[in-house]
């Protein structure tokens, strides 16, 4: 979506359809951009969404590119945050065709000895799985789940609202006090390795927490990784890891249908080259084709922070401190992904794994630490930790009966200095290197599912540059719009002192995962940007009334 900046593009001639007024332009038709556009359209604004790719969706798309009979998601697949999101719930996407499906088990983490821990939406099933590793660990899981139940409503409210979440934060503080106060806060701040050691005797609970922490770029020894692993595990426990029936793009289609029903417009194949700034205010955008689309009220950017402040907005419109801070912006890990069409179910040695939608593939917490350490040393891991998706198990529409549409992704460094696997993978990602890495991924699966490779009918390899070509927000294959580490969260996201969707340019709002609360398909950055834009165009009395009503809608009680 971002391109080379044309510094002269601060003036332009409008070329929108004669007789129409565009109140807002949204750059990018990813889920955050589409959520923002829907909320603006709900308020009666005329909205245009401009998308660089030939189809909308950003990282929420599917195709039949591996095999015509198989549906494979290009990027994201499982959506616990979407299921938990009050933002998406408020859009009632089920009225626009969206349906969810679940695998029998949420998640499994098998080990090479055939043992396996399972996360299931039934707490007793999860607890029994942990007890198989160490009696008593099931009760420890129930205690963690009990704390989650006590804080969940206000924690999610605080997570999905702009920073600082004053009202939700106050309620959350009271909930935390009732749930154990400083002791629970300390537990959630721990590295996930330490948290697992304190809470569980056996490997089962430790694996569930540590594997979930590595859904982001958080090593088992990173501060706060325990809290993130707990959050993801508890989301799975409560909401599951659901998938849209028919493919991830079904979620995008529902968002587009809803927007179009309100008169909004999505225009694909329109790469935005620059934000038009006039009189110190964002007043529109200019496309690579030379079209200037005027925005009477706001421009919302569902693009990464480096793309917005490094490409789309001329430096003269930005504070020097912001440009200096942006040089310290840290991306999350690069991603390497393989999609498969399989002639049969994956032959996991641990049969419980066959019933899970998501499978974590690593032989223990130590192997997770080894993997993260190799990435920190800029080495291509020799035994990559895999997130493995069994999509037909999750949604039977994805492939013919008796087959499996599957994928796995792992992480690699953005800058590679060595290959821990000693196969000469250097990061140029030419075809031979992509195939060698894909073979390594398959060999890792074979350790836990002997005979897996014999089932492969077809495969597709998506190296980091390919992911970026398909979605410019995925810089080098980074999935989360920037690191999930504590130093780039909350008030530090995307740079110190921001933490909100407002930008230094009036009328311009950051609506991507680079803004608080970060990555994941939940729509919060887009919703926060839309609400900020709407507040700017309300009289002070109405703005306060809107804030009060929004708080009441989210909580179901008076603020």
Image (cartoon, helix red, strand yellow):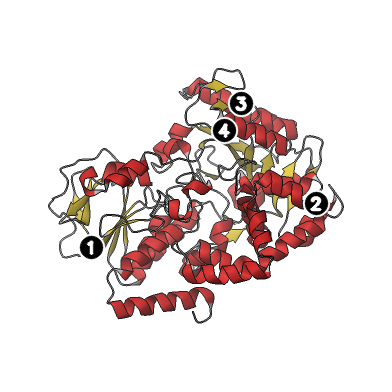
Residues at marks 2 and 3, CA–CA distance in whole angstroms: 32 Å
Residues at marks 4 and 3, CA–CA distance in whole angstroms: 11 Å
Q: On the image, numbered disc 3 is attached to which residue?
A: 439
- Ranked by sequence position, the earlier of labels 4 and 2 is 2
Residues at marks 2 and 1, CA–CA distance in whole angstroms: 56 Å
Q: On the image, numbered disc 2 is attached to which residue?
A: 130
Vertical comparison of 531 with 140: above or below: below
* Furthest-front residue in this view: 182
Q: Give percent across and percent down for residue 475.
A: 42, 38
Q: Is residue 177 left or right of residue 271?
A: right
Occupied quadrant, residue 173: bottom right
Q: Give percent across and percent down for residue 213.
A: 62, 47
- Ranked by sequence position, the earlier of labels 2 and 1 is 1
* Furthest-right residue in this view: 135
- Ranked by sequence position, the earlier of labels 2 and 3 is 2
Task: Name the one closer to the observer, 75 or 202.
Answer: 202
Disc nearest the viewer among 2 and 1: 2
Q: On the image, numbered disc 4 is attached to which residue?
A: 459
* Numbered disc 3: secondary structure: helix
Do callouts 2 and 1 mark residues in contact (Cβ within 8 Å)? no
Vertical comparison of 312 with 460: above or below: below
Disc nearest the viewer among 4 and 2: 2
Task: Name the one closer to the observer, 79 or 539.
Answer: 539
* Numbered disc 1: secondary structure: loop
Disc nearest the viewer among 4 and 3: 3
Disc nearest the viewer among 2 and 3: 2
- Is residue 125 in view? yes
- Ranked by sequence position, the earlier of labels 4 and 3 is 3
Occupied quadrant, residue 389: top right
* Numbered disc 2: secondary structure: helix
């Amino acid at each position: 979506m971002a391109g080379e900046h044309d510094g002269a593009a601060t003036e332009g001639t409008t070329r929108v359809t004669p007789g129409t007024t565009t109140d807002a332009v949204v750059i990018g038709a990813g889920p955050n951009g589409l959520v923002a556009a829907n909320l603006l359209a709900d308020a009666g604004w005329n909205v245009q969404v401009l998308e660089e790719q030939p189809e909308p969706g950003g990282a929420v798309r599917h195709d039949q590119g591996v095999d015509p009979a198989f549906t494979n998601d290009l990027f994201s697949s499982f959506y616990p945050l979407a299921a938990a999101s009050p933002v998406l719930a408020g859009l009632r996407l089920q009225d626009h065709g969206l349906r969810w499906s679940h695998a029998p088990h949420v998640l499994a983490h098998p080990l090479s000895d055939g043992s396996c821990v399972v996360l299931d939406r039934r707490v007793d099933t999860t607890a029994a799985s942990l007890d198989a590793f160490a009696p008593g660990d099931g009760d420890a899981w129930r205690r963690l789940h009990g704390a989650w139940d006590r804080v969940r409503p206000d924690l999610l409210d605080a997570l999905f609202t702009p920073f600082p979440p004053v009202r939700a934060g106050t309620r959350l503080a009271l909930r935390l006090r009732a749930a154990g106060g400083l002791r629970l806060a300390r537990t959630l701040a721990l590295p996930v390795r330490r948290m697992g050691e304190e809470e569980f005797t056996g490997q089962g609970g430790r694996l569930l927490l540590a594997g979930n922490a590595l859904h982001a770029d958080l090593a088992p020894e990173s501060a706060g990784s325990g809290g993130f692993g707990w959050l993801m595990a508890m989301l799975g426990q409560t909401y599951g890891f659901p998938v849209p029936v028919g493919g991830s793009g079904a979620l995008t289609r529902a968002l587009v249908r809803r927007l179009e029903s309100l008169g909004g417009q999505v225009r694909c194949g329109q790469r935005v080259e620059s934000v038009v700034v006039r009189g110190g205010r964002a007043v529109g955008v200019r496309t690579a084709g030379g079209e200037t689309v005027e925005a009477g009220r706001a421009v919302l950017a569902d693009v990464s922070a480096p793309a917005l402040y490094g490409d789309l907005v001329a430096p003269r419109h930005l504070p020097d401190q912001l440009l200096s801070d942006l040089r310290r912006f840290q991306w999350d890990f690069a991603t390497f992904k393989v999609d498969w069409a399989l002639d049969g179910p994956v032959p996991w040695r641990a049969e419980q794994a066959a019933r899970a939608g998501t499978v974590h593939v690593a032989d223990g917490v130590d192997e997770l630490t080894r993997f993260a350490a190799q990435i920190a040393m800029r080495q291509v891991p020799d035994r990559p930790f895999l997130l493995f998706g069994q999509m037909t198990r999750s949604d039977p529409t994805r492939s013919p009966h008796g087959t499996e549409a599957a994928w796995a992704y792992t992480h690699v460094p953005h800058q590679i200095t060595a290959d821990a696997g000693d196969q000469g993978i250097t990061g140029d990602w030419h075809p031979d290197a992509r195939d060698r890495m894909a073979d390594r991924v398959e060999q890792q699966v074979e350790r836990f599912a002997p005979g897996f490779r014999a089932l492969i009918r077809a495969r597709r390899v998506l190296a980091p540059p390919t992911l970026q070509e398909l979605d410019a927000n995925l810089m080098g294959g980074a999935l989360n719009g920037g690191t999930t580490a504590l130093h780039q969260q909350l008030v530090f996201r995307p740079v110190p002192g921001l933490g909100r969707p407002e930008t230094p340019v009036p009328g311009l709002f950051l609506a991507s995962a680079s803004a608080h609360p970060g990555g994941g398909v939940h729509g919060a950055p887009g919703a926060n940007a839309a609400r900020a834009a709407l507040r700017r165009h309300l009289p002070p009395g109405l703005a306060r009334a809107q804030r009060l009503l929004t708080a009441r809608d989210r909580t179901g009680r008076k603020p």
